[in-house]
């Protein structure tokens, strides 16, 4: 192994071990958290709910053909006295796929399997401008909605 890598591991371990010793935090009690499912209209559930399925039609087909398979999107609703937080994993697969493909490209470039030279597209600045405008517009519509 490289000496720099070993040194980085040692320093990271030192940070994890020494930080709580040097900077002890105050022990505050957290306010009680009520966790309910998004589909429940009754009283709050006593046990924490980690996932509540909401059916979402997926384009995938059953083996051997047939109707589309229903895939559950996990949704959790966490409520406190001052806030309500709804968490969903919808779109997580897309983010994971993009991250994984980026990792493969990085591996290929580091192993020199993919050339590292920068190749731009024709009118790259114009494409970037319109992409940013569209993404900002979609982001503004998502915030307002």
Image (spheres, rainbow, N blue to C red):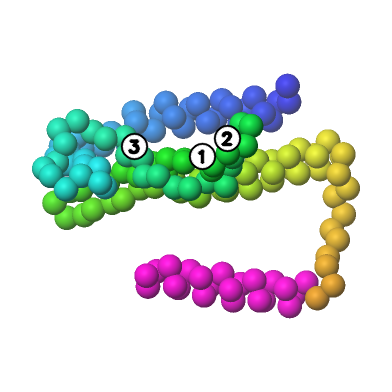
The CA distance from mark 2 to mark 3 is 24 Å
| Secondary structure mainly formed by the magenta segment | helix
Judged by depth in the image, the label closer to the viewer, 1 or 3, is 1
Residue 68: percent from left, percent from top = 54, 43
The label number, if any, that marks residue 21 in the structure image: none
Q: Horizontal placement of 60 versus 41: left or right?
A: right
* Badge 2 density bin: few <14, some 14–19, many ≥20, Cα 10 Å: few
SS of the residue under disc 3 = loop
Please identify the quadrant where the N terminus is shown: top right
> Given the current orientation, which residue lies at the most extreme top position?
1
Q: Is residue 93 visible?
A: no
User: Sequence order check: which comes first, mark 2 or mark 3?
Assistant: 3
**Residue 81 vertical position relative to residue 68 in the rendered view, above or below:** below
Disc 2 to disc 1: CB gap under 8 Å? yes
Tell me, for residue 69, which label it has, or none: 1
Q: Residue at x 20, y 48 (%)?
A: 79
Q: Please give the range of residues in magenta.
A: 124-145
Q: Residue at x 23, y 53 (%)?
A: 84
């Amino acid at each position: 192994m490289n000496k720099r890598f070993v040194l980085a591991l040692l320093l990271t371990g030192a940070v994890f071990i020494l930080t709580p010793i040097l900077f002890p935090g105050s022990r505050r009690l957290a306010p009680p958290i009520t966790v309910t499912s998004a589909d429940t209209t009754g009283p709050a559930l006593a046990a924490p709910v980690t996932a509540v399925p909401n059916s979402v039609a997926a384009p995938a087909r059953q083996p051997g053909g047939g109707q589309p398979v229903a895939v559950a999107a996990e949704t959790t609703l966490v409520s406190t006295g001052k806030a309500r937080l709804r968490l969903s994993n919808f779109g997580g697969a897309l983010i994971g796929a993009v991250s994984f493909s980026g990792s493969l490209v990085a591996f290929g470039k580091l192993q020199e399997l993919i050339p590292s030279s920068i190749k731009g597209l024709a009118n790259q600045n114009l494409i970037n401008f319109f992409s940013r405008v569209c993404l900002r517009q979609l982001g503004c519509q998502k915030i307002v909605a």
